[in-house]
Amino acid sequence: MEQWMLLRKGAEFDRIAKKFHISPRLACLIRNRDVIGDEAIEQYLNGGISKLSDGYLMKDMEKSISILKEKIENHKKIRVIGDYDIDGVNATYILLEGLEKLGAEVDSDIPDRMKDGYGLNMDLIERAVKDGADTIITCDNGIAAKEEIAYAKSLGMTVIVTDHHEVPFEESEGEKYYILPPADAVIDPKQADCSYPFKGLCGAAVAYQLMVKLIGVFGRSPDELSYLIENVAIATVGDVMDLTGENRIFVKEGLLRLRNTKNPGLKALIECTGLDRNHIGSYHIGFVIGPCLNAGGRLDTAKRALALLRAKTEQEAKVLAEDLKALNDSRKDMTAKAVEQAAELVENQPEGKDKVLLLYLPDCHESLAGIVAGRIRERYWKPVFILTDAAQGVKGSGRSIEAYHMYEGLNRCKELLDKYGGHKLAAGLSLKKENIAPLRRMLNEFCTLTEQDMAEKVSIDMELPFSCVTEKLVSELELLEPFGKGNTKPVFAARNVFVLEGRILGKNHNVLKLRVRDSADTSIEAMFFGDIDRFFGYLEERFGAGAGKRVLGGRADGMKISVTYYPGINKYQGRRSPQIVITHYR
C-alpha cells in the first residue's frame, strides 16, 4: 500500500519570491527539494559552469596532472580503460578528446561485459602491455581493482585511477577501514580525505574536471573542452546520479549544448530516434539516447557507442546510430520477457516473500539483469537482485529502495561472493551457483527493513485545484528543470475528483485519456500512462463490476477518487488547453 505524504517544509516564501522574482508557490516547491538559503536558491535557479568547484580540490588531482604532463611531453603511450555503460563510455570519450588535444599518444580499451566483466582485469592489463602502453588511466572504474593495479605496477606500469564509486572498506568493531588500490594517483571524490565538496559526480564529470585542469597546465583555455559538457550531462542522467548541486549545473548546461550539438554521432542518434532537437530534456537522455548508447555494451560491445561519439562523418555516424537503435529495440523485447519471468517468481515462489529479493533467471541475458531488477523493484518496492548464468558461475545486478544500502548489504556477505561493487541504490556481483541459496538467506538475515520501509512513498508537494493549471504555472515550473533523481518533478494532488468519462488511445492501447472534475467544479483533461488494467480493476473494486466499461461509455455515475498529478498544456492543431498527467490514484 502506498504512503501518501504531504510535504510541509517551512520558509519565508513571500520574501524568497520577491527576492528571486518567482511566485511563492515556486519558492515552496524549491524548499521542498531541500534547497535552503539564498546562496543555494541562487545556484539552483541560475548556477552556471563558473559555479563548479575547483578541480584541484580533488585528492591526487595535482599528482595526476604532473604525471600526465610528463608522459605527454615524453611521448609515452597512454591507455584509457573505461567501462561498458553510458558513464564509462562518455568518460572514456572525454579523456581521449582532452589527451588528444594535447598531443598525447593515447588509445582506449573498454571491457566486454560478457567476457571481461566490470572494471579492470588481468587480461586488460596484459593487452595494454602487449600494445606498448606505459600508463593506464581508468575512468568510471578502478577504485576496487586493488589486485589488478598491483599486477600492473609489478609490470612497471604507471596507473592513474579516476572513479566515482564507493571506496571498498572492511569493518571491524563498527569502524570502517578503507582499502585504496596501489595506483600512482587516485582521483575519486568519495575518498574520505578528498576535500572536493560535491561527492555526487559521475565518472565522466571526474574525467572532465581532470582534463580541464590538465589543459590549463599546458597554457590552453578550458573553453576548448566546453563541448564535452554535453557528454557529462548524458553520463550524469544515464548513470542516474542525483540532479542536485554540481550535477544540476552540468545537466542544465549540457542539455543546452546538446540541442545544438556539433557531434556527428549524437546528431545522427537524435535524428534516427525521432527526437526534436529543440526540446531535448533529461527524460530523453534517460529513456531514448541513454538506452541506445547502453545497448552496445549490453548486447554487443560498448566500443560501438564510443565509435559513435568519435565518428567523423555523417555517413559513418548514421550507420552506427541506426545499429545502436536496432540493438536497443531488441533489448526492449528481451527485457519485457525477463520482467514477466521475474514477476512470476515473486508471485508464485517462496523467494517472492523475502524482504530482499534474490531472483535467479538462468536464461536472462546477463546485461539486462540491472534493468529487470529496476522494473521489479518498482513493481514490488523491495530491494532486488537478478542473477543469471555467466561464462563462469553466476552474475547479477541489484537495484534498491531508499531504506536499504545495497553495497553495505553485499559487503556483509562478501565471503559468499567472488566479486562485487556498487553503491547505495545499485550494485553488481558474481558468485558460484552453489552460493545462491546461502546468499539469499544471509542477505535476509541481515536485513532490518520494516513493512513501512517497503511501502512506496508518494511525497506530495501541495494540493492544487485544477483551476490553477495555467500556462503561467506550467511555464514557471520549467525553472525547476532538469528533473530526475534528486530533483523530481513536483507532485500535486487533488481529492474528491469525479471521473466523468474516458477513452483508450495509442497504437498499443496503453494510454488512458480521462475527463475529470475537482471539488471546486473545474473539469480538465487527464492523461494516464500507467497500467490501465490495474486502474480499471481498482475502479471495479470500489465502484462495482463494469466500472471500467461505464467510464469508457461516458457513464461514470459519480466515481470519486484522489489523484496526484503533474500539470501541462496540450497542444493540438494550433489549440492550447490545460491538462494534467495522473501519476497515482486512490
Image: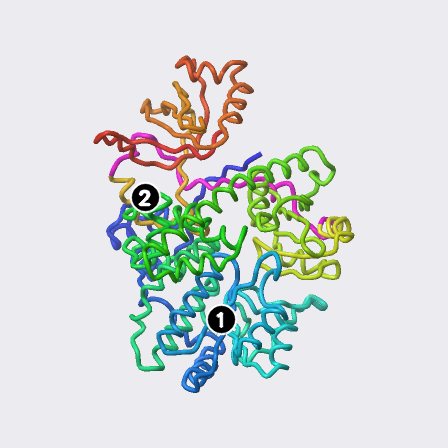
Q: Would you place residue 403 above or below residue 77 in this image? A: above
The x, y position of residue 193, in whole percent, is: 53, 74
The x, y position of residue 171, in whole percent, is: 69, 67
Numbered mark located on residue 25 in the image: 2
Tell me which corner region of the image, top left, top right, bottom left or bottom right, holds residue 96.
Answer: bottom left
The x, y position of residue 575, in whole percent, is: 22, 30
Q: Is residue 528 left or right of residue 578?
A: right
What residue sits 53% from the left and 67% below the top?
Answer: 190
Circles 1 and 2: CB atoms closer than 8 Å: no
> In the depicted view, which residue is nearer to us: 444 or 76?
76
**In the image, which is nearer the foreground, mark 1 or mark 2?**
1
Q: Is residue 201 left or right of residue 262?
A: right
Residues drawn in magenta = 444-471
Q: Is residue 405 left or right of residue 42?
A: right
Task: Report the residue marked by disc 1.
Answer: 80
> In the depicted view, which residue is nearer to us: 572 or 50?
572
- State how the image is colored: rainbow
Indicate the quadrant containing the N terminus: top left, top right, bottom left or bottom right: top right
Q: Earlier in the sequence, mark 1 or mark 2?
A: 2
Question: Of the residues shown, which amino acid type is indicated by label 2?
Answer: Arg
> In the depicted view, which residue is nearer to us: 480 or 394?
394
